[in-house]
């Protein structure tokens, strides 16, 4: 799928919604991304302010590890799509990503909508030379007082090749 759009089920029934990502796999080396809509999914261009950090570990050398601010992984009053997880996933079969996105009170029409995400993509070059495990954290807010009524997921390039995304409402 080029995009996965949740255009129903996000309303005032619950104050909190959680999307669970299970073994998301890209068709090309790519970042997993999210965007929000206030018009039921016609336009995914709502202004966001976010920050992103990542933790990474090279499985082969055990020497390339780190914890860093994810340059380019945040938006400052931007309308672009938000990357999740800090880095790319590869296309080999041992590459995929899992995690969650938690959105708070998306139906509120008084305040902005906050969200947090944790996404763990794995990257492995086609020759197997650079197997990395990543753990990315993204948080921020959708800067609108209009209700968020749709959420879209897509890859930065290519398609979502496999995986499951589940939506839960939390009371």
Image (tube, rainbow, N blue to C red):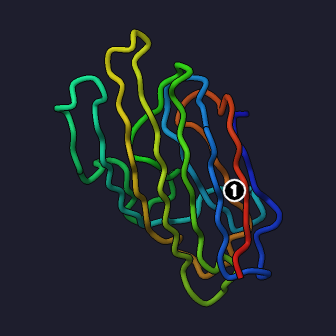
In-front residue for pair 152/166: 166
Q: How many numbered discs?
A: 1
Q: Quadrant of residue 146?
A: bottom right
Residue at position x 52%, y 19% from top? 92
Badge 1 local density, few (<14 within 10 Å), some, or many (20+)? Answer: few
**On the picture, is 164 further left or further right than 100?**
right
Looking at the picture, does residue 72 appear above or below residue 10?
above
105, 94: nearer the viewer: 94
Q: Quadrant of residue 51?
A: bottom left
**In the figure, residue 160 lies in which quadrant?**
top right
Q: In front: 83, or 99? A: 99
The residue identified by callout 1 is 43
Left/right placement of residue 128 relative to residue 13 reads left
Quadrant (top left, top right, bottom left, bottom right) of the N terminus: top right
Residue sitting at x 68%, y 37%? 163
Mark 1 lies on a secondary structure that is: loop
Q: Quadrant of the C terminus?
A: bottom right
């Amino acid at each position: 799928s080029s995009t996965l759009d949740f255009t129903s089920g996000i309303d005032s029934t619950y104050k909190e919604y959680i999307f669970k990502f299970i073994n998301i796999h890209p068709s090309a080396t790519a970042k997993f991304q999210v965007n929000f809509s206030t018009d039921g999914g016609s336009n995914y261009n709502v202004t966001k302010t976010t920050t992103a950090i990542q933790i990474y570990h090279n499985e082969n050398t055990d020497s390339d590890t780190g914890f860093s601010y994810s340059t380019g992984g945040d938006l400052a009053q931007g309308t672009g799509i938000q990357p999740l997880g800090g880095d790319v996933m590869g296309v080999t079969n041992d590459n995929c990503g899992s995690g969650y996105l938690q959105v708070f009170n998306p139906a509120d029409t008084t305040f902005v909508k906050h969200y947090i995400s944790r996404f763990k993509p794995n990257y492995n070059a086609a020759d197997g030379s650079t197997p990395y495990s990543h753990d990315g954290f993204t948080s921020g807010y959708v800067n609108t007082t209009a209700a968020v009524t749709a959420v879209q997921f897509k890859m930065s390039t290519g398609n979502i090749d496999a995986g499951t995304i589940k939506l839960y409402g939390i009371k």
